[in-house]
Image: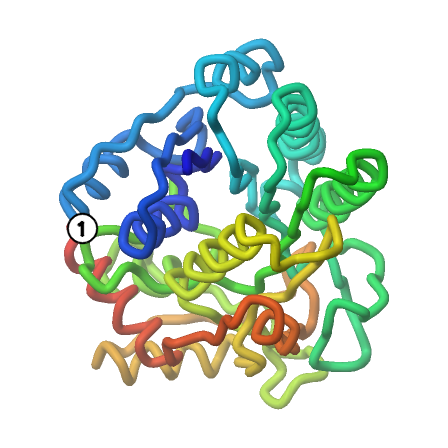
Amino acid sequence: MKILITGGAGYIGSHTILEVLERTNWEIISADSYLRSTPATFERIKNISGKQIKNYTVDLCHREKTRRIFSENPDIQGIIHFAALKSVPESVANPELYFHNNNESLKNILTCIKEFGIKNFIFSSSCSVYGNIDKLPVNEETPLQAAQSPYAQTKKDGEKILSEFSKNNSDVHSIALRYFNPVGAHLSALIGEIPIGKPDNIVPSITQTAIGKLKQFNVFGNDYNTRDGSCVRDYIHVSDIANAHVLALRSLFEGKIKNNFEIINLGTGKGVTVLEAIKAFEKASGKKLNYLIGPRRDGDVEAVYSDSSKAKKMLGWVPRHTLKEMMESAWKWELNRR
């Protein structure tokens, strides 16, 4: 089996490559433009696995360059599509960039899927598609509310594009994985999240503050209708997310998914506030975090966590790592990359 992983040098993409190498005999090629990643990621993958991954340095918004990947690899049998911009604040500041990059790259991949007869596709979606909802936890049938950021809207758009594509291409089987908040690092501490510039995500912001790269960690709001006033999220170890992608693609290869388009949540089912996440990090690291509570941030939803029973039923997937392990692995990675 040869598979294409787009965004293979990214945070989740790189961990998924390692999971594929550890648990399958599939051949991997990657496509990553390094817009939000670095080539050094593939050296880290090689140091852990002993395998060199071939990467096409291609902007997937460029249709002909994208098509060249497929023409040179006509034996691709499955695709995991991660490549997308993912910063909520950046999307609020520059929505045009997000709508172009995230939606056009998906359209080009689907055009190639149709042309080259590829039957199996995994789409990286997000819990941000749910918006602000009243009933928790959310499951795949929960009605989607208004997108709170352009990033979230691009994921809603992506699912809609894929749904319509599936109606007209019944021989292609696709799964959109809506994952919640990936955190942590590979247990080797040799690879993890590498923000380009100042991080927007919570855990690298916490670890960079604790190690002194950032002066303080900002808590965006303590006046939400939650148990301590800060936002509630469903944090999940990145390696658990990676494992779910392997199980999902394997299920497609083995013909276990009967509908040609499925949406599946990936979360722990446990809501954790930002202030609770800080306390969990302090306990795991032994470090006192310098943080400041400030005003709310545009684009953030109040609370969201997952009912992931469908993932267990359809994929046999159950998260393995605790919040403590997530924080410990992220801190070890931060210490290791100094």
19, above or below 324, in the image: above
Can residue 197 be seen? no
Q: Return the residue nearer the eye: 302 or 50.
A: 50
* Residue under numbered circle 1: 337
Residue at 63% x, 75% y: name it: 306
Quadrant of res 132:
bottom right
Say how the picture is coloured.
rainbow
Residue type at mark 1?
Answer: Arg
Residue at 79% x, 72% y: name it: 133
Q: Position of residue 75 (x, y in %)?
A: 47, 25
- Mark 1 is surrounded, within 10 Å at the Cα level, by few (under 14), some (14 to 19) or many (20 or more) other residues, namely few
| Residue 130 left/right relative to 117 | right
Residue at disc 1, secondary structure:
loop
Q: Position of residue 188 (x, y in %)?
A: 18, 60
Can residue 37 be seen? yes
312, above or below 82, in the image: below
Q: Position of residue 155 (x, y in %)?
A: 70, 46
Q: Position of residue 220 (x, y in %)?
A: 57, 66
Q: Which quadrant of the figure contains the N terminus?
A: top left
Residue at 35% x, 72% y: name it: 326
306, above or below 157, in the image: below
Q: Return the residue nearer the eye: 221 or 12.
A: 12
Residue at 62% x, 14% y: name it: 63
Q: Return the residue nearer the eye: 94 or 325.
A: 325
Q: Return the residue nearer the eye: 88 or 315.
A: 315
Disc count in the image? 1
